[in-house]
Amino acid sequence: GLAFFHALLQERRKFGPLGFNIPYEFTESDLKICQTQLQMFLDEYQTIPWEALRYTAGETNYGGRVTEAFDRRTTAMMLMDYYNPKTVNDGYKFSESGKYGAPPGNPKLADTKAWIETFPLPDEEQPEVFGLHENANITSARNQTYSLFDSMLLLMPKGQSSDSGGGQSSDQLLEQLSQQMQAQMPKESDFFRFGLPFKVDEVSELYPTDYNESMNTVLTQELLRFNRVVVVMRSTLQQLELAVKGLIVMSGELEQVANAFLIGQVPASWLKTSYPSLKPLSSYFDDFIKRLSFLQHWIDQGPPPVFWLSGFYFTQSFLTGILQNYARKHKVAIDTLRWDFMVRLDHPEEKAEDGCFVEGLFIDGAAWDHGTNLLTEQRPKVLFEVMPIIQLLPILTSEFALKTGDYPAPLYKTSARRGTLSTTGHSTNFVMQMVIPSNSEEAHWVKRGVALLSQLDD
């Protein structure tokens, strides 16, 4: 069981974030240390100390390499399948299909090797042995394909025309792209009546700081954050247009922007000031304009009944603002509150009396059954599904309790799942845990790698 667990940890990495958020380098020494400790515990104790074995392996030896909290949860849940009293019984299987299991009786080394040879070959193994859905094979193949395409793009020659028949040159393409993007970000228009960048002082007159309405402050702070992105993008586009015309020198930074445009990627200089995104250039820009439109609708029509959670630059500030409104309304300390969640299949037309309604999330690794309103298995060849509207309701921490079938699903901004710790003390990718109902145990969905995403990569 321990050797099988070690093999699964090594192979699970090929599924990318669906397997582990961070690809860890587990080594043979981890396995040997666990084997030595296992022998020691068996020699010194009359009964097998399962808890101690799980702790030394899952939290110390293998767990010592795992730095991400949800990866640690995954390894602990996986280890439960191989370090439990049932594993010493004949007939115990390591996977749901029953194709993998320990040899019966007390076999010798040659018998064990012969037993292992009956397992499906590596190219025939199914994701179910890892606890994953069969769609995980598609995810693995897609990750390998994208990696290959990235390498091919790096080798692609720059500065040539698109074909030998007199197609657009690189300079013409760059000039056209920059003009089109600038046209979609007008300094002022009938729709963007507060301009781009937004005139925050004028918006603050409509939505002044209010003790009982933190959303006013959230709105103005979001406008300031998006303004920084607008300024950088517009400046870059204007300079790039002048550079391809030969009116200014093409600097190193502008050349990096031009190279990114030519292969359809978002320039690194934009991502430095922007929210996290793995989208290609055209999808990223469309998404950016959609976020600006979301904020403009908020300015024009007031806070929406259902918030587009994916549209926020700093999602945690919005969530804190909702908690703050509840705490001040009901006169309770904000640090005694946490979130409760209710999945709604309708579309509310009015604001929530307490808390808020949010939309725009996607499920990775599972699907949603609209008949039972529960988390369920993916459909074949469907990797992501839209999550219904969720009501976020603040409740006292002392009143919260997980119910049977509840799965605490992590919510991430991108499918990469991993992030870094920002200066605010929050992760640049992880947002929060959302507890959603299902008809299976938590361990099942943990091994499936189920998570919620605020945006997809396309």
Image (cartoon, grey):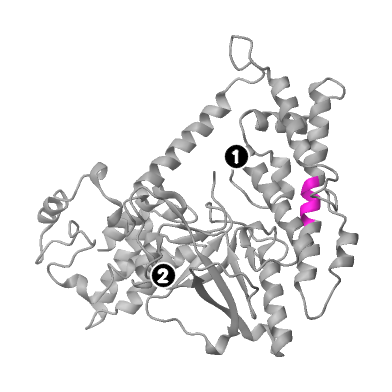
Residue 298 or residue 240, whichever sits in front = 298
Residues at marks 2 and 1, CA–CA distance in whole angstroms: 33 Å
| Place of residue 75 in the rendered image (x, y in percent of width and height, measured from the top left) | 39, 64
| Residue shown at the point (64%, 51%) measured from the top left | 276
Residue 297 or residue 407, whichever sits in front = 297
Image quarter in which the C terminus is found: top right
Asked which secondary structure carries label 2, the reply is loop
What residue is disc 2 on? 373
Span highlighted in magenta in the image = 225-230
Q: In this view, does 145 lie above or below 393?
A: above
Give the numbered dot on residue 280: 1
Image quarter in which the N terminus is found: bottom left
Q: In this view, does 361 lie above or below 166?
A: below
Q: Are the two marked residues, 2 and 1, in contact with CB atoms closer than 8 angstroms? A: no
The mark closer to the camera, 2 or 1, is: 2
| Place of residue 92 in the rendered image (x, y in percent of width and height, measured from the top left) | 17, 67
Residue 253 or residue 392, whichever sits in front = 392
Drawn side of residue 118 relative to residue 223, left or right: left
Q: Is 410 inside the magenta-drawn segment?
A: no
Residue type marked 2:
Asn
| Place of residue 208 in the rendered image (x, y in percent of width and height, measured from the top left) | 86, 71
Q: Is residue 138 above or below residue 407?
A: above
| Residue shown at the point (45%, 42%) measured from the top left | 143
Q: In this view, does 128 lie above or below 139?
A: below
Badge 2 density bin: few <14, some 14–19, many ≥20, Cα 10 Å: some
| Place of residue 61 in the rendered image (x, y in percent of width and height, measured from the top left) | 41, 65
Looking at the image, tell me whether mark 2 or mark 1 is earlier in sequence order. 1
Q: Main secondary structure of the magenta part?
A: helix
